[in-house]
Image (cartoon, rainbow, N blue to C red):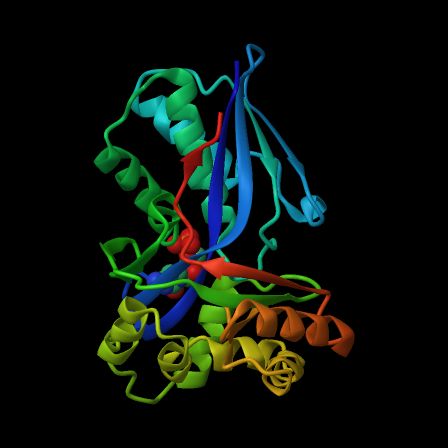
Amino acid sequence: MSVTVRVPAKVNVQLAVGAARPDGFHDLANVFLAVGLYDEVTATPSPDGPRLTCEGPDAGQVPLDESNLAARAARALAERHGLEPAVHLHLAKDIPVAGGMAGGSADAAGALVACDALWGTRAPREELLEICAELGSDVPFSLVGGAALGTGRGERLRPLEVGGTFHWVFAVAEGGLSTPAVYREFDRLTEGTDVPGPVASEALLSALAKGDAAALAATLTNDLQPAALSLRPALADTLEAGRTAGALAALVSGSGPTTAFLAPDAATAARVAAALTASGTCRTARTTTAPAPGATVLS
Ligand code: C5P
């Protein structure tokens, strides 16, 4: 008996970052959009104790010890229900690792839903979301998918309406970026300046609700982009290659180094992806659509 759960990646169509808080986190106005690149998490009983395995192009970069967010998710659910986390979690990873697309968060949300089904714990949605928020700022969104405004450190979610399908291209970079390092660079770059409180853009929320790609392109922002570019200046070349190839807009995805390109239609997305791959400024380029559903049990 085993349970497989599919979980989407995300792009932040707005990432407004406030000043560092006393706890080191930053208050955000974080507009999450789930996109159709997925990891799959399979949970199988493991009588000899917890086990974690991983497959995929970046599997070698994924920690397989207890620090892995998926393993921590299984343990958190087991502890709350007085169970042993005697589970083998297998991660089939298609989301870039350390790429700014919440791949680790997706695995945590997937592990939680898979273990809940496998163990029959039937935890209420609120409890699952609470565990997600304890695990990481982006984990609750991986569970719910679609589109949502995240406030606080990103974990407090308000679902958002999306009025159509958006076409995206993602350029996967060689190597990852550490999210804490990117936030530290943000702090360094904004030191001595008055960082305004983060506010969601009404124009952006309206573009999402209407399914209007041109309007969304005009309102995309990511306050972490200068920090990601400062740590990885070559990303500017990737952004430029995608813009030149016909993307409506280009931005760094979350803390990077994956870059995201909004296209007006599927044909343009395919052309932008081909141009990005040919440009030699990224490892590979992927086309997909949004919004995508949250964590879903497949079998
Ligand atoms: O919540 P999560 O574990 O994903 O955060 C990873 C790191 O990103 C944090 O340790 C912190 O350095 C940074 N972060 C932040 N403000 C947020 C979210 C994350 O500074 N709102």
Q: Which of 167 and 72 is in front in this view?
A: 167
Q: Would residue 249 be found to the left or right of residue 201 on screen?
A: right
Q: Which residue is drawn at 60% across and 70% down?
A: 267
Q: Which of 43 and 28 is in front in this view?
A: 43
Q: Is residue 207 above or below residue 142?
A: below
Q: In which quarter of the image is residue 119?
A: top left
Q: Is residue 22 above or below residue 71?
A: below
Q: Which residue is drawn at 48% across and 30% down?
A: 298
Q: Residue at x 49, y 38 (%)?
A: 6
> Which quarter of the rendered image does ligand 1 occupy?
bottom left
Q: Residue 12: horizontal and vertical position, in percent?
A: 41, 66
Q: Residue 125: horizontal and vertical position, in percent?
A: 25, 35
Q: Which of 264 and 76 is in front in this view?
A: 264
Let me know if residue 73 appears in the view: no
Q: Quadrant of residue 19?
A: bottom left
Q: Nearer the viewer, residue 126 or 65?
A: 126
Q: Is residue 294 above or below residue 216?
A: above
Q: In which quarter of the image is residue 286?
A: bottom right
Q: Which residue is drawn at 39% across and 84% down?
A: 218
Q: Residue 88: horizontal and vertical position, in percent?
A: 56, 22
